[in-house]
Image (cartoon, rainbow, N blue to C red):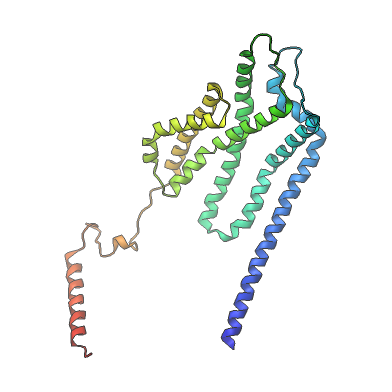
């Protein structure tokens, strides 16, 4: 009965532990949603000003006397609504990651915690850096190119809904592309490759960066190059960081490959060790033969 009671208590404890984790996860998800909602409510009264700031790279280059247009009845409301909601999520990312980290961290080892925190912080900063690069560098060059090649007699009057979809795609493309150093660092840290092997594959990575730029950006050479070149540069940054912070793994004496190896010649066992092993094996074999069935 005592064994049955112990097993029953163990099952109840496991069920309670799982239920506690689910309750904690629910609470943290609610906090995350609440944080986004609060930021949205604070920012929504300024939705028109926010859209004007976001549209400034295009408005500054449009011909005099032209403006952006809304071709849908609901666009004047839905476009600022979507923009403010996206901005609220982006601004809440540090808090959202903090909630996820607080939920996951208790199950991690101390060395994993020391490594995960810098990677999370650098990922967020690089994502923001990619968005800033797209807004301040890519948009002015890209919109100037599109307006300059407009056929004569065609007035550039961009729809606000299509403009929002366009800039969201560009923001996420550059934000994700700027995570290349973190991805490179994690691949090398996991042992999937080494800095030397990655460096040898540099030509393929450069070609891959331009292929990714072609897939994630509009079909023009300027935007593709503006995405591919930073990806290449950030790949080099990831290699440098991995060479600085990731040390080659060294096997210790407890590793099976080092058993029965001496320090002078780790590739061959010592002759004395081999003789001792053979004598022990012969003694055990003789003892087994002499043992009655």
Q: How many marks?
A: 0
Q: Is residue 191 shown left or right of residue 6?
A: left
* Residue at left offset 48%, top offset 46%: 186
* Residue 153 x/y as whole percent: 69, 9
Q: Is residue 263 shown left or right of residue 184?
A: left
Residue lying furthest right: 45
Residue lying furthest bottom: 292
* Residue 63 x/y as whole percent: 71, 13
* Residue 91 x/y as whole percent: 69, 40
Q: Nearer the viewer, residue 265 or 186?
A: 186
* Residue 283 x/y as whole percent: 19, 80
Q: Quadrant of residue 124?
A: top right
Q: Is residue 37 shown above or below 284?
A: above
Q: Is residue 230 shown above or below 5?
A: above
Q: Is residue 87 shown above or below 37?
A: above
Q: Is residue 7 shown above or below 183?
A: below
Q: Quadrant of residue 92?
A: top right
* Residue at left offset 60%, top offset 56%: 104
Q: Is residue 257 shown left or right of residue 69?
A: left
Q: In the rendered image, which quarter contains the C terminus?
A: bottom left
């Amino acid at each position: 009965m005592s064994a049955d009671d112990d097993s029953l208590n163990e099952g109840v404890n496991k069920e309670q532990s799982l239920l506690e984790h689910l309750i904690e996860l629910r609470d943290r998800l609610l906090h995350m949603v609440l944080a986004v909602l609060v930021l949205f409510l604070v920012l929504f009264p300024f939705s028109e000003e926010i859209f004007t700031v976001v549209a400034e790279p295009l408005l500054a280059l449009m011909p005099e006397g032209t403006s952006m247009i809304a071709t849908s009845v609901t666009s004047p409301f839905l476009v600022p609504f979507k923009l403010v909601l996206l901005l609220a999520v982006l601004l809440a990312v540090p808090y959202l990651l903090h909630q996820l980290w607080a939920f996951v961290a208790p199950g991690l080892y101390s060395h994993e915690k020391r490594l995960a925190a810098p990677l999370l912080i650098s990922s967020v900063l690089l994502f923001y850096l990619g968005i800033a690069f797209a807004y301040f560098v890519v948009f002015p060059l890209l919109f100037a190119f599109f307006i300059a090649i407009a056929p004569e007699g065609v007035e550039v009057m961009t729809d606000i809904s299509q403009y929002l979809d366009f800039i969201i795609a560009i923001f996420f493309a550059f934000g994700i592309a700027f995570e290349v150093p973190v991805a490179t660092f994690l691949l090398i840290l996991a042992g999937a490759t080494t800095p030397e092997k990655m460096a040898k594959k540099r030509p393929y990575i450069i070609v891959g960066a331009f292929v990714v730029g072609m897939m994630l950006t509009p079909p023009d050479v300027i935007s593709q190059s503006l995405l591919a070149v930073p990806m290449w540069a950030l790949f080099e940054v990831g290699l440098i960081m991995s060479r600085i912070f990731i040390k080659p793994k060294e096997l210790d004496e407890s590793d099976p490959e080092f058993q029965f190896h001496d320090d002078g010649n780790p590739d061959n066992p010592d002759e004395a060790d081999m003789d001792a092993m053979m004598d022990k094996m012969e003694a055990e074999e003789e003892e087994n033969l002499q043992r009655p069935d």
